[in-house]
Image: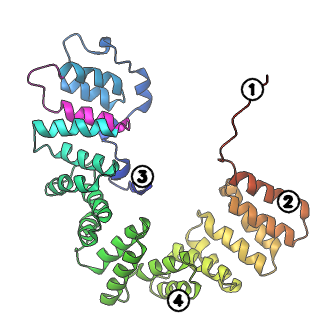
Amino acid sequence: MESELTTRSRGRRAAGTLLVLSLACGVAGAQAATGDPANVPAAGPSYQQAQQLASHGRLEAAMAVLNVLAQKQPEPVGVERLRGEILYQKQMLVEANAAFARALAEDPADREAMEMRGVTLYRLARPAEAIPLLERANQTVSSANIDPEYVLGLCYMDVKRYDDARHAFAQQFGFAPDSPAAYVATARLLLRREFTAEAIAFVDHALAVDPRLPMAHQLLGEIALAQANLPKAIAELESEERLNPLNGNLYEHLGDAYVRNGQYEKARKVLNRAILLEPNDTGPYILLGEALTGLGEPAEAVHYLAHAEQMDPGNAVTHTQLGRAYRAMGERQLAAREYETAVAIQHRNDPKPAQTQEK
């Protein structure tokens, strides 16, 4: 679930890794925060001082100010919301949810608390409870710190309200809710959450309306490739190539399909295009090395694989393919070295046995 939230940051914060901007600055400054009363100015604490401390990453000091403010009657507006934001950043989600609930009890129209409680409930795997809050927040102008319509769409997915999810994502991307583009955008997000059948149905609907819609055939090709249905994958990806010939990512997937299908010469052709269009992606270099080894050109394969290894030394697949290329060249020692490196990388994060103490 969390991974779903850590990949969208262009222009606006991804909701799954949402950190309120007032809390996202100066993590190093948090080390200076002690929560000591000395951090509270002599003139007495204020909500603005708590905000300023939080904005500089001094979360414990900010929380100390909030604790003092909470003793006032009535409690200053915003105290519980800021407390929730600090707790959220500290990954104390249960406590953050309680703080946002108190903020809403004090002010039911507090949109930021509404948004943040909805996101927190989503991260607590309580999407059905998050939906009403996010729906209400989504009726107002969204804040700069959160994408409530995106999180709302994820919640709709989790409760199988797929058309409602499409409407939320369409709003996020600025598409008409029933447009083919909205169906394809939602299908990609459905696939990311492993709702494969629903993703296919959405793409099929989009193509029935607009057979030339970019990215639709590619998505079907990626699904077929993941299912090892190589003929369908190749057919769909070739259809996408005719519609969208400058898409480097497409050529990587098509090259992958050709390599798996033993069509190495075709793979060479499209993977060269992928490298020209996406020179900083290691995938095409690795696949091209595999294709060249299959074509009986292992020395040329080593050239591309070595470049991929320089870009990402920790990729086990690169070292495996280097081992195959060296073995095809008769370089047994080099091949063994690469195979050993690949195995070491694969087992790098394996649990280590507990150290036994000598008696």
Callout 1: SS: loop
Q: CA distance from mark 4 to mark 1?
A: 61 Å
Q: Residues within 10 Å of mark 1 (few under 14, many from 20)?
A: few
Residue sitting at x 32%, y 84%: 205
Question: On the rendered structure, is 252 left or right of 136?
Answer: right
- As for residue 20 lying within the magenta part, the answer is no
Examine the rendered structure and indicate whether residue 12 appears above or below residue 177.
above
Q: CA distance from mark 3 to mark 2?
A: 38 Å
**Of circles 4 and 1, which is in front?**
1
Is the C-beta separation of discs 2 and 4 under 8 Å?
A: no
- Amino acid on which disc 3 is placed: Glu
Examine the rendered structure and indicate whether residue 151 appears above or below residue 69.
below
Residue beneath disc 4 = 235
Q: Which mark is residue 357?
A: 1
Q: Residues within 10 Å of mark 4 (few under 14, many from 20)?
A: some
Q: In x, y percent, where is residue 131?
A: 22, 56
Q: CA distance from mark 1 to mark 3?
A: 38 Å
**Of circles 3 and 2, which is in front?**
3
- Amino acid on which disc 1 is placed: Gln
Residue beneath disc 3 = 2
Residue beneath disc 2 = 336
Mark 1 or mark 3, which has the lower sequence index?
Answer: 3
Examine the rendered structure and indicate whether residue 270 appears above or below residue 65.
below
Q: Identify the image quadrant of the N terminus.
A: bottom left
